[in-house]
Amino acid sequence: MLTVWGRENSTNVKKVLWLLDELGETYQLVGAGGAYGKVNEPLYLSLNPNGLVPCLQDDDFVLWESNAILRYLVERSGNPMFWSSDAQQRASADKWLDWASNSLPLPFRQVYINLIRTPEDKRDMAAVATGIAGFEKLWPVVDAVLAKQTWLSGDTFGIGDIPMGCFAYAWFGLEIERQPHPNLERWYQQLTQRPAYQKHVMIPLS
Ligand SMILES: N[C@@H](CCC(=O)N[C@@H](CS)C(=O)NCC(=O)O)C(=O)O
C-alpha cells in the first residue's frame, strides 16, 4: 500500500500525487505540513528527519525528496512511457527534474510567497519583480526545447514534464505581466487537458 504524507497545495507534493494518478496507482494521502502540522512530531520525523513534505511509504520502505520519489515510482511501475529503457531518452527527460529543482524555486518563492501568501500591504514588490525577471531568463530555455518537441520528456508526456508543469500552473495563474513564450504556452495548454493535472495541480493557488 502506498501512502503519501503531504499537503495538497505544495508544489513538491503535487508532483507526486499527479504522477501517481498518471500511473493509475492506488494510494492514501495523509495530511502533513502547513496547516496539517505533524511534520515536527516524532512519528513524522522518524520517517523524514527533514520535517518536510512529501514523504512516501511503500509498505515498509520510506522515501523522501520529491524527485527521488518520482524516479522510484516510475521505475516501480515498469511503464516505459515514463522511464524509457533507452539511457539517453531517459536522461533527456530526467534532467528536467534537476533543472526545475535547481532553477525555479528561488524566483517562484519571490513571486508566489509575496503575491499569494502575503497580505497586500506587506508584499515585497521588488522581490516580485526580481522573481519575474528570474523566470523570464529561464523560460526561453524551455521554450526553445519545446519548439522542437511536443513534451519536455520527448515525443510523449513523461516524468520530465511533471515538476515544470507544477511551476507553470502557478506562473500562468498569477496576475502578472508575462512575456510571450508560444511553445511554453502550447505545452501548458496540453497539460491542462490531462485529468490528473486538472485534479492535483489546477487547484486554487494558496
Ligand atoms: N527537496 C525537498 C523539498 C521539500 C520541501 O521544501 N517541502 C516543503 C513544501 S513544498 C515543506 O515541507 N514545507 C514545510 C511544510 O509544508 O510544513 C523535496 O523536493 O521533497
Image (tube, rainbow, N blue to C red):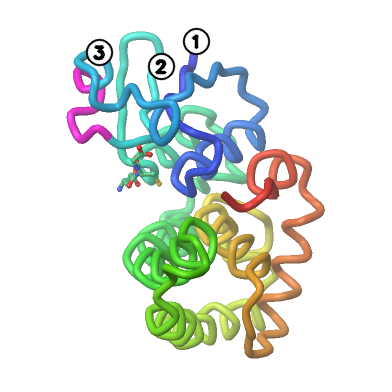
Residue visible at 38% across and 18% down in the picture: 57
Segment colored magenta? 45-51
Residue visible at 30% across and 36% down in the picture: 52
Look at the numbered disc 3 and give the secondary structure of its residue. helix
State if disc 1 and disc 3 touch (CB < 8 Å). no
> Is 103 above or below relative to 90?
below
Residue 127 in the figure: left or right of residue 147: left
- From the image, tell me which residue sits under label 1: 1
**Residue 156 location (% of width, % of height):** 68, 57
Mark 3, Cα crowd under 10 Å, few <14 / some 14-19 / many 20+, is few
Residue visible at 62% across and 18% down in the picture: 26
Check disc 2 and give the amino acid type. Asp
How many labels were placed on the picture?
3
Check disc 3 and give the amino acid type. Leu
**Residue 160 location (% of width, % of height):** 52, 57
Query: In the image, ligand 1 is in what quadrant?
Result: top left
State if disc 2 and disc 1 touch (CB < 8 Å). yes
> Is 169 above or below relative to 30?
below
Q: Is residue 50 magenta?
A: yes
Residue behind label 1 places its C-beta within 8 angstroms of ligand 1: no
Distance between the alpha carbons at the discs numbered 3 and 1: 19 Å
